[in-house]
Image: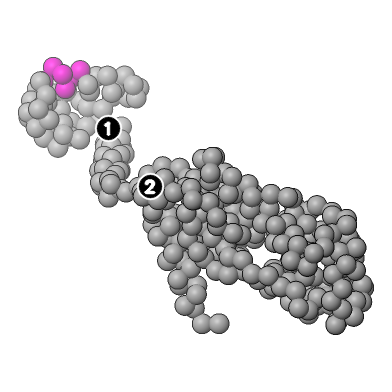
Amino acid sequence: MAIAKFGQLTRAAEKLHLSQPALSGQIKALEEALGISLFERTSSGMTLTAGGRTLLGEAEHILGSIQQLKQVAQQLHGRPAGRLSLGTVLDPVTLRLGDFLNRAIETHPLIDIELHQVFSGAALEGVRDGSLDASFFFGAMNDDGVRGEPLRPLVYRVALPAEWKLPQGNTDWNAIAARPWILAPPTSSHRQLAMKLFQTRGVAPVQVIEADNESVILNLIASGVGASIVREELALASAQEGRITIWPGAEMSTRLWFIFGAEREEDPLLEAVRAVLRDVWRQEEAAPA
């Protein structure tokens, strides 16, 4: 581009702070690499060949892209960069996962986020041992080594197959405990909530069928396999459709969290995504019903 502009090797070399032989050698190497003659050498200077004129536009485009690359790099300088492994529990809508990821990608393009669907117990353990950088989690927060951003309360209701037809006023927990129960694995908060419900009434389920997520649990209840506890919004919707029955007078509350290790409370990457998370949940809670 410099030679085409000045038409002379000498003036171009001065502009580029190169020796004339060095610049001449670069042009020769470029012509050999491209397999095309770029300049015609004359006694008065150098002029572009037809092929050189065509490639000059490409060269200008390339240098413009390089300049743009530098500008973008300068804009990104100092932004948090790295990879975060995040655990997810429950469904994406409940976690507002789509809004969170869209906002995180837009605000922090240098942070790569990988998601891992886990049980609540595995989420807590993963944050403890470092296999997860952070995670969504629901249940009791009683570990000094784990910190959490509270997101929203969760209410669970006892859900029964519609065909069981238990009397609405029935409070015989021995009778309900004798029926099959569908529960998540022992390390899950779902199982712990259900067992606490039984323990406060001095009984225990006789038969437990394990299921690995709430959509499966809800489907098994509707299919008449057994009873379980279900998030209130899901239970009410299914009961309204006539797929299940909600047993009155038996509900329990817990909380949804975004958890991370106490030692990483000031980690720049986690601080960045936590700020995005707070912003998303603040906007969602403020939205009109």
Which one is nearer the viewer's eye here, 226 or 117?
226
Which one is nearer the viewer's eye here, 100 or 266?
266
User: Can you give x and y, in whole percent of width and height, for residue 69 in the image?
Assistant: 30, 43
Instruction: Kindly identify the residue that appears in the image at 92 percent across and 72 percent down.
Output: 164
Magenta stretch holds residue 47: no
Amino acid on which the number 2 mark rests in the picture: Asp
Q: In the picture shown, does residue 252 fall above or below 25?
A: below
- Please report whichever mark, 1 or 2, sits nearer to the chain's N-terminal start: 1
Which one is nearer the viewer's eye here, 61 or 83?
83
Instruction: Kindly identify the residue that appears in the image at 47 percent across and 77 percent down.
Output: 286
- Asked if residue 17 lies left or right of residue 70, the reply is left
**Dot 2 lies on which element?**
loop
Residue 225: image quadrant is bottom right
User: Can you give x and y, in whole percent of width and height, for residue 68 in the image?
Assistant: 28, 46
Residue 52: mark: 1
Q: In the picture shown, does residue 223 fall above or below 127?
A: below
What segment is highlighted magenta in the picture?
A: 20-25
Dot 1 and dot 2 residues touching (CB under 8 Å): no
Q: Is residue 237 visible?
A: no
**Dot 1 lies on which element?**
helix
- Asked if residue 10 lies left or right of residue 85, the reply is left
Cα separation, mark 1 vs mark 2, equals 53 Å
> Which of the image's four quarters has the C terminus?
bottom right
Residue 267: mark: 2
Instruction: Kindly identify the residue that appears in the image at 15 percent across and 28 percent down.
Output: 46
User: Can you give x and y, in whole percent of width and height, for residue 16 in the image?
Assistant: 12, 30
User: Can you give x and y, in whole percent of width and height, for residue 33 in the image?
Assistant: 34, 21
